[in-house]
Every structure is written in C-alpha cells, then in structure tokens.
Amino acid sequence: WKMYLKDFVPKLFPWPSSDIVSDCHSSRLMEECGFEVLSCHNKDFEVQFDNKEQIREFLRPLFPHSHYIPQEKHDEFLDDVKKMAEDHHFISRGDVPTVIVTFLVVHARKL
C-alpha cells in the first residue's frame, strides 16, 4: 500500500495524556474552555460484527486517506487492515469478531 500512500500526511490531534487528572477526574482542557467538569472517566464500549462488510464499514472512517487508493482496491485494503487489527488484538478473532473501544466521557456545564 506504500505506493498509494506516499503522498499521505497524517493529521493526528492526540488528546494530551497530561490533560486528564486521574485523582480528581477532571479535564483541564474543558476547564480552560470555560466549563465546570462534573465528572470525567473512561468507558469501554463493545462493538460486535455479524459479517465482513460490517467490519469494513466500521474501519472505513478510521482511514480517511483511502482516497489515495484506487476504489477497486478499497475492499482488499480494508481486509488487510482487519488482519493487521487482529494481529495487534484490536479486533478479536473468532465467530463473532469484537472491538473494545474506549471513550473519554465528560459531563460538564458552561460557567
């Protein structure tokens, strides 16, 4: 896939791990934006897939750079991504493939 993605420049905007203050469950970023943080925690969400197409549709928005790849190769690319995700234990193998996604849940109010 390297030949197709040579011009791709990733746009990553990671949430800084230093922003989460675990002992008091607050988020400095939200507070700096004028919110009072009422609670802040991580929540795991389990997604199960019934078929290969559901997995592809789940993965598709995670790879916006797929427009660099010819349309007729998208399914093959997503199948390779799925295999890589299984190899790295992001997607479980088995009869019902599953993904555990962790979300940051913040309850806040504007001051």
Image (cartoon, rainbow, N blue to C red):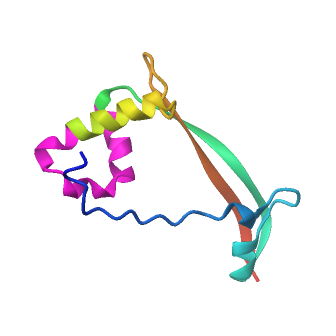
Residue lying farthest to the right in this orientation: 23
* Relative horizontal placement of residue 83, taking residue 34 as reference (left or right): left
Q: Quadrant of the C terminus?
A: bottom right
16 or 107, nearer to the observer = 16
The furthest residue to the top: 95
Q: Is residue 92 above or below residue 78?
A: above
Instruction: Name the residue: 49% across, 25% down.
Output: 92
Left or right relative to 98: residue 83 = left
Q: Give coordinates of residue 91: x percent, y percent.
A: 47, 31
State the image coordinates of residue 8 (x, y, percent, origin top left): 29, 62
> On the picture, is 60 further left or further right than 17?
left
The correct choice, above or below, for 96 with respect to 37 in the image is above
Q: How many numbered discs sit on the rendered protein?
A: 0
Q: Is residue 9 above or below residue 100?
A: below
Predominant secondary structure, magenta span: helix
Q: Which residues are magenta?
A: 53-75
- The residue that appears at 21% across and 57% down in the rendered structure is 67
In the rendered image, residue 55, in percent from the top left (x then y), is placed at: 36, 35
Instruction: Return the x and y of residue 94 as percentages of the image width and height.
Output: 45, 17
Query: Which part of the image, by quadrant, shows the N terminus?
Result: top left
Q: Quadrant of residue 35?
A: bottom right
Q: Image quadrant of residue 84?
A: top left
Residue 60 falls within the magenta-colored stretch: yes
Residue at 70% in and 49% down = 42
| In magenta segment, residue 39 | no
Q: Please state if 36 lies on the left or on the right of 95 as rendered.
A: right
Residues 4 and 80: in front is 4
